[in-house]
């Protein structure tokens, strides 16, 4: 994916190995997210096999899904993603795809922090990365080491089942989506060169404000009963506790009886919402799975 990367994209494309053991053909797909410089021209001259340009900048998450859809139409068996700034050591692509070739994993993440905090990486960004990584690990119930990196590989089945809603970013959402769908996600250490600026993390507070709802939405979609159940448990606990305290120690603490009863009633409503959401989301998941199977069959028939 690229946005006004005329200074870096050419070098990044030229660094992509065209001969990889176990791979018959390597093709380079560039997603231009509304660049206004010479990104497209330089990418073409550097040897990109296909370039898809958005008319305007619509976000990293939307660009990722454009790449996924076009990778499927190009009959890709393995997809490796990275940003056009050339931060990751692109020569390590084989390290990302070997676990997929060996059927160890369906998704492989390039872990930038296997030696803790690398040189020149801003401390505030490093701390933010660790916080989000721990949060995603907690939500998924699976230990990740670097959930913000874009240097990853995906198997054909993984890309056929990938669904990202957010236009802002995809890094956390796609991991949660594929993990909850049962795909095997692994990691491999990589090296990278930190660029002085970040196109996505211009502000830690803005990134946090944009990313937290994405993680929460993924949890609600894949685990609605648990999410609404926790919320219901909190509300009912507060309601019951306030009733008990008011009953036994009325002079110390007093809560309106209607308010505490309302909290208990609201907790019941919350749990029922979880049950209803579970039915709706399950139905959507089945429809999505059926649609992906039809697309897979259609592509396979065209490819034969």
Image (cartoon, rainbow, N blue to C red):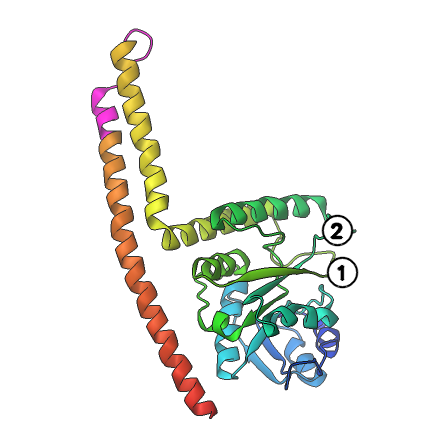
Q: Is residue 281 above or below residue 266?
A: below
Which of the 4 image quadrants contains residue 191? bottom right
Horizontal and vertical percent position of residue 182? 45, 61
**Is residue 25 rendered magenta in the image?**
no
Which is more toward the observer, 210 or 134?
A: 134
Query: Could you tell me if residue 54 is visible in this image?
Result: no
Q: Is residue 170 above or below residue 56?
A: above
| Residue of label 2 | 115
Q: Is residue 194 above or below residue 39?
A: above
* Picture mark count: 2
Few, some or many residues within 10 Å of mark 2 (<14, 14–19, 20+)? few
Q: Is residue 230 above or below residue 88?
A: above
Local SS, label 2? loop
**What's drawn in magenta, residue-wise?**
250-262
| Residue of label 1 | 193
Horizontal and vertical percent position of residue 240? 28, 24
Local SS, label 1? loop
Q: Horizontally, is 291 left or right of 116 in the view?
A: left
Q: Residue at x 63, y 72 (%)?
A: 97
Real-space CA distance between mark 2 and mark 1, rounded to the nearest whole angstrom: 14 Å
Horizontal and vertical percent position of residue 304? 46, 93
Disc nearest the viewer among 2 and 1: 2
The residue sitting at the right extreme is 119
Horizontal and vertical percent position of residue 162? 46, 67
Q: Residue at x 39, y 80 (%)?
A: 295
Q: Horizontally, is 36 left or right of 164 in the view?
A: right
């Amino acid at each position: 994916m690229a946005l006004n990367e005329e200074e870096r994209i050419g070098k990044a494309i030229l660094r992509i190995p065209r001969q990889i053991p176990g791979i018959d053909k390597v093709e380079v797909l560039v997603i231009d997210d509304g660049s206004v410089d010479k990104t497209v021209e330089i990418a073409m001259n550097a040897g990109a096999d296909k370039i898809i340009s958005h008319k305007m900048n619509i976000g990293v998450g939307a660009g990722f899904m454009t790449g996924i859809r076009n990778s499927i139409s190009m009959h890709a068996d393995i997809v490796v993603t990275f940003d056009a700034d050339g931060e990751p050591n692109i020569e390590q692509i084989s390290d990302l795809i070997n676990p997929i070739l060996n059927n160890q994993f369906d998704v492989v993440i390039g872990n930038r922090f296997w030696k803790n905090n690398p040189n020149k990486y801003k401390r505030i960004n490093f701390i933010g990365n660790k916080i989000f990584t721990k949060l995603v690990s907690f939500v998924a119930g699976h230990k990740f080491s670097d959930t913000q990196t874009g240097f990853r590989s995906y198997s054909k089945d993984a890309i056929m089942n990938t669904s990202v809603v957010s236009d802002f970013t995809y890094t956390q959402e796609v991991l949660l989506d594929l993990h909850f769908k049962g795909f095997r996600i692994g990691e491999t250490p990589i090296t990278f060169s930190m660029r002085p600026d970040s196109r996505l993390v211009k502000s830690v507070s803005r990134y946090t404000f944009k990313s937290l709802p994405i993680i929460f939405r993924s949890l609600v979609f894949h685990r609605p009963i648990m999410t609404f159940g926790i919320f219901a448990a909190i509300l009912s606990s507060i309601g019951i506790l306030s009733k008990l305290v008011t009953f036994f120690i009325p002079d110390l603490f007093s809560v309106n009886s209607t308010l505490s009863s309302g909290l208990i009633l609201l907790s019941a409503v919350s749990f029922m919402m979880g049950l209803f959401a579970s039915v709706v989301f399950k139905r959507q998941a089945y429809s999505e799975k059926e649609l992906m199977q039809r697309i897979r069959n259609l592509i396979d028939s065209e490819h034969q």
